[in-house]
């Protein structure tokens, strides 16, 4: 039996509640805009609760098959489920929020 005090281990950081994957094809203007727009949206609506994985299909083209990517840039919401995809530079904030299910569909219509 072991007694005494031992230093407590730090709790493992909690997994991000939102796991997003952005597929791009190189550093094009659309790809850069999509990433910048996504970061702004995440910081404003999911601060501290998200991870963004950027996948450059020019470097890893085989990774497109897993998520059935047909166009770039494409944002894939991996978690929470269900998986959702949004194609484009993500400049339409309301469309992205509705697509991520952060804004009800009726509120997104103007």
Image (spheres, rainbow, N blue to C red):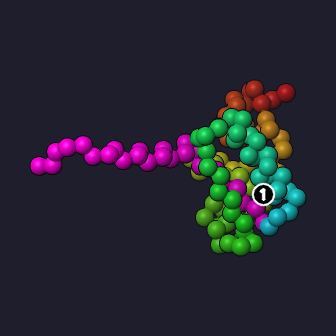
Q: Is residue 78 left or right of residue 23?
A: left
Q: Quadrant of residue 100 in the image?
A: top right
Residue holding disc 1: 73
On whether residue 52 falls in the magenta region, the answer is no
Q: Is residue 75 left or right of residue 51?
A: right
- The answer to whether 34 is drawn above or below residue 59 in the figure is above
Q: Position of residue 64 (x, y in %)?
A: 67, 66
- The answer to whether 3 is drawn above or below residue 69 in the figure is above
Q: Is residue 11 left or right of residue 54?
A: left
Q: Is residue 103 visible?
A: yes
Rendered residue at 76%/42% (across/down)? 40
Q: Quadrant of the C terminus?
A: top right
- The answer to whether 38 is drawn above or below residue 46 in the figure is below
Q: Position of residue 44 (x, y in %)?
A: 72, 35
On whether residue 11 falls in the magenta region, the answer is yes
Q: How many marks?
A: 1
Q: Quadrant of residue 103 in the image?
A: top right
Secondary element at tag 1: loop
The magenta-colored residue range is: 1-25
Direction left: furthest residue: 1
Q: Main secondary structure of the magenta part?
A: loop
- Mark 1, Cα crowd under 10 Å, few <14 / some 14-19 / many 20+, is many
Q: Is residue 83 visible?
A: no
Q: Nearer the viewer, residue 59 or 83?
A: 59
Rendered residue at 41%/46% (across/down)? 10
Rendered residue at 81%/58% (across/down)? 31
Rendered residue at 72%/60% (across/down)? 23
């Amino acid at each position: 039996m072991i007694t005494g005090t031992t230093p407590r281990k730090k709790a493992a950081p909690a997994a991000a509640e939102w796991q997003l994957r952005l597929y791009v094809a190189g550093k094009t203007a659309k790809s850069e805009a999509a990433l910048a727009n996504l970061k702004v949206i995440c910081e404003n609506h999911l601060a501290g609760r998200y991870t963004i994985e950027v996948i450059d299909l020019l470097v890893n083209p085989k990774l497109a098959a897993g998520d059935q990517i047909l166009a770039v840039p494409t944002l894939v919401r991996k978690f929470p489920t269900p998986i959702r995809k949004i194609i484009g530079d993500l400049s339409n904030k309301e469309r992205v929020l509705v697509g991520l299910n952060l804004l009800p569909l009726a509120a997104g219509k103007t």
